[in-house]
């Protein structure tokens, strides 16, 4: 399973470390910031790890 | 008798031509905002998240997979294919199905005070939802989607470092996913047996 709850973020700027076990087949890591479990998405990030 | 131009130095014929060109280019620009050569809405590179709830077992899903595959090529689009589990009772199992995908879709339904889930369903930026094969609806949804804040992701062994911007309206839940872009697997049973489906970015 590759879904991981990265915790609650209060919206303050900063750096957060999140433990994450990469599925070996993954070539991208996606991060979403969402209101509640499935409210509006307000932030997103993507990291391409295909070369690793 | 010819009309005289109110603008100095411009004949009525030149003015008429300018109006024609203005109307032509305005129409072209407006059309370009809605459709490009591929029929997709033109949009900026601000991130937009397009989620597709799909299944190998669903005969309507290959068309939606194609829509997701195509939109995934657009800069700024984060396309995510969630294979749900609730069709797995049909005698065989979607090899990509995940219980967290089903739970996520049910949570979206609950958010709308509904218990109805279906495939293929598309959700844009966690808000607007519609049948996943509806290209024009997706195009409109992306056009009016609010710009998302960008989260910078860095990788360390067993760990991610997230650079989070200032974002009002919190708190927010942070979700992290591992994705395989353009993942396709043979479908050996069910309604789509033997069909070639579009490879889509898939949650692992």
Image (cartoon, grey):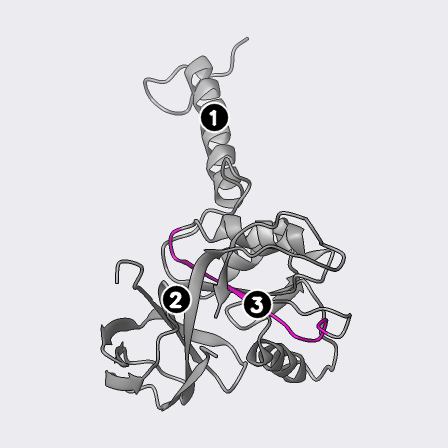
The residue sitting at 51% across, 77% down in the picture is: A40
Mark 2 neighbour density, 10 Å: few (under 14) some (14–19) many (20 or more): many
**Magenta region:** B75-88
Chain bearing mark 2:
A
Quarter of the view holding residue B105: bottom right
Q: Is residue B91 visible?
A: yes
Decide whether residue B87 is among the magenta residues. Answer: yes
Is B111 magenta? The answer is no
Q: Secondary structure at mark 1?
A: helix
Task: Report the mark closest to the observer, 1 or 3.
Answer: 3
User: To which residue does mark 1 refer?
Assistant: B19
Confirm whether residue B134 shows in the render: no
Q: Residues within 10 Å of mark 3 (few under 14, many from 20)?
A: some
> Which residue is found at the position 46% from the left and 13% from the top?
B13
Residue B160 lies left or right of residue A7; in this view the side is: left
Residue annotated with mark 3 = B96
């Amino acid at each position: 399973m590759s879904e991981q709850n990265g915790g609650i973020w209060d919206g303050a700027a900063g750096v957060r470390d999140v433990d994450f076990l990469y599925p070996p087949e993954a070539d991208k890591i996606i991060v979403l910031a969402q209101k509640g479990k499935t409210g509006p998405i307000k932030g997103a990030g993507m990291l391409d790890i295909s070369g690793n | 008798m010819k009309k005289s131009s109110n603008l100095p130095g411009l004949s009525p014929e030149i003015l008429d031509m300018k109006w024609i060109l203005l109307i032509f280019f305005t129409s072209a620009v407006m059309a370009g905002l809605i459709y490009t050569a591929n029929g997709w809405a033109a949009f900026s590179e601000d991130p937009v998240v397009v989620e597709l709830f799909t299944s190998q077992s669903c005969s309507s899903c290959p068309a939606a997979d194609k829509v997701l595959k195509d939109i995934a090529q657009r800069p700024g689009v984060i396309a995510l294919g969630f294979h749900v589990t609730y069709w797995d009772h049909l005698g065989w199992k979607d090899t990509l199905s995940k219980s967290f995908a089903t739970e996520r879709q049910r949570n979206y339904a609950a958010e709308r005070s509904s218990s109805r889930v279906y495939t293929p369903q598309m959700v844009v930026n966690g808000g607007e939802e519609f049948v996943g094969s509806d290209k024009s609806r997706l195009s409109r949804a992306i056009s009016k989607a609010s710009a998302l804040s960008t989260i910078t992701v860095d990788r360390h062994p067993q760990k991610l470092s997230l650079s989070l911007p200032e974002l009002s309206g919190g708190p927010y839940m942070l979700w992290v996913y591992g994705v395989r872009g353009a993942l396709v697997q043979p479908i050996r049973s069910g309604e789509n047996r033997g069909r070639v489906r579009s490879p889509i970015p898939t949650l692992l």
